[in-house]
Image (tube, helix red, strand yellow):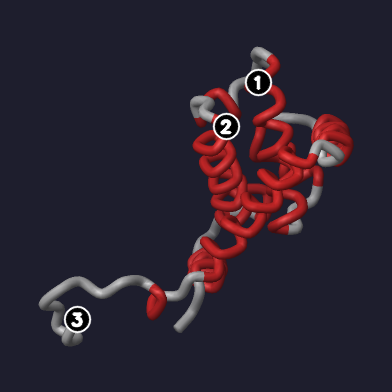
Amino acid sequence: MPNVIDLIDTAAARSSASAWASPKNRLFAQLSRVFVAHELGVPVEDLRRASRGVADICEARQAAMYLAHVVFGMSFTAVGREFGRDRSTVAHACEQVEWRREDVSFDALLTRLEWQLRAATQMTRTDAPRQEGSAHGG
């Protein structure tokens, strides 16, 4: 069975969308935002806003941009596009997050988020729980 990423690649290949509007990159960025927002207790919509925001929002956005780059291999340009930022801002965010990883608790948080994001995108249809009484004998 194909994983989530394979399904997105297939859909993207069939669509007429340009490379600038990659459905896969959009998904990766959104997953990063949602996971970070949930873990840090900030509104997910604040991570895409044009304004910098308060320190906790800025730090959460930096972490989400970092994860999109590190976990999903998105370029700084692609991450910037999905977060409404310039590539140099993404590079700066990744540098700041690397410095913050010296804090053991922050490093543990990012390690957990990296693992969760990788696991979420590797799940296949066969990994999904079956419903009771389904046609497949669940």
**Image quadrant occupied by the N terminus:** bottom left
What residue lies at 25% left-to-right and 74% top-to-bottom? 130
Q: Disc 2, disc 1: CB below 8 Å?
A: yes
What residue lies at 79% left-to-right and 51% top-to-bottom? 75
Q: Residues within 10 Å of mark 1 (few under 14, many from 20)?
A: few
Q: Quadrant of residue 84?
A: top right
User: What amino acid type should be assigned to the residue bearing mark 1?
Assistant: Asp
Task: Say which residue label 3 marks.
Answer: 138
Sequence order check: which comes first, mark 2 or mark 1? 2
Q: Disc 1, disc 3: CB below 8 Å?
A: no
- Residue 57, above or below 112: above
Q: Residue furthest bottom?
A: 137
Residue 131 in percent (x, y) is at 20, 71
Which of these two is toward me, 59 or 111?
111
Sequence order check: which comes first, mark 1 or mark 3? 1
- Could you give the CA–CA distance between mark 1 and mark 3, rounded to whole angstroms? 44 Å
Sequence order check: which comes first, mark 2 or mark 3? 2
Residue 2 in percent (x, y) is at 49, 79
- Could you give the CA–CA distance between mark 2 and mark 1, rounded to whole angstroms? 8 Å
Left or right for 45, reference 92? left
Find numbered disc 1 in the image and state the secondary structure of the residue it sits on: helix
Task: Say which residue label 1 marks.
Answer: 56
User: What amino acid type should be assigned to the residue bearing mark 2?
Assistant: Leu
**Disc on res. 40:** 2
Q: Quadrant of residue 24?
A: bottom right
Q: Residues within 10 Å of mark 2 (few under 14, many from 20)?
A: some
User: What amino acid type should be assigned to the residue bearing mark 3?
Assistant: Gly
**Disc on res. 20:** none
- Could you give the CA–CA distance between mark 2 and mark 3, rounded to whole angstroms? 36 Å
Residue 94 visible in image: no
